[in-house]
Image (cartoon, helix red, strand yellow):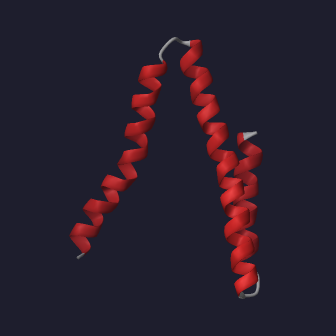
Amino acid sequence: MMVVAAAVCAANYAGFSFASFSAAMLMAAVVVSAIAWSFARATEQGLASMTGQQFAMTGWMSVIWNIAASVPYFGAYLLGGLLS
C-alpha cells in the first residue's frame, strides 16, 4: 500500500506540473495531493505501529517518529536563520 500511495503522489505531482494553470486545476491538484499524501502517511503510521507492537516497543516508536518529524523543521529554522 505504501508503494501505491507514493506512486500516486509522484504521478499527481508530475501530472499537475504540466497541466494548464487555472483556479480549478490548482484546487484539484491540492485536493488530490492531500488525499494521496494522507494515504501515504496513514500507511507509514500503520507500519510503524505494527512494528512497535510486534517488538513491544510502542513508546520508543513514538519517540523515534517525533524526533524524525522534528528534524526537518529544526533544519528549516536553522537554514532560514542563516539565509536571513
> x, y (%) of residue 74?
31, 53
Classify residue 24 as left or right of residue 68: right
| Residue 18 visible | no
Q: Is residue 3 above or below residue 49?
A: below
At a point 42% along the width and 41% down the height, the residue shown is 68
Classify residue 80 as left or right of residue 14: left
> x, y (%) of residue 6?
70, 50
Q: Quadrant of the C terminus?
A: bottom left
Q: Quadrant of residue 51?
A: top right
Q: Is residue 79 above or below residue 20?
A: above
Q: Quadrant of residue 31?
A: bottom right
Q: Is residue 82 above or below residue 8?
A: below
Q: Quadrant of the N terminus?
A: top right
At a point 41% along the width and 38% down the height, the residue shown is 66
Q: Is residue 21 above or below residue 52?
A: below
The total number of labels drawn is 0
> x, y (%) of residue 21?
71, 88
> x, y (%) of residue 5?
73, 48
At a point 59% along the width and 13% down the height, the residue shown is 54
| Residue 70 visible | yes
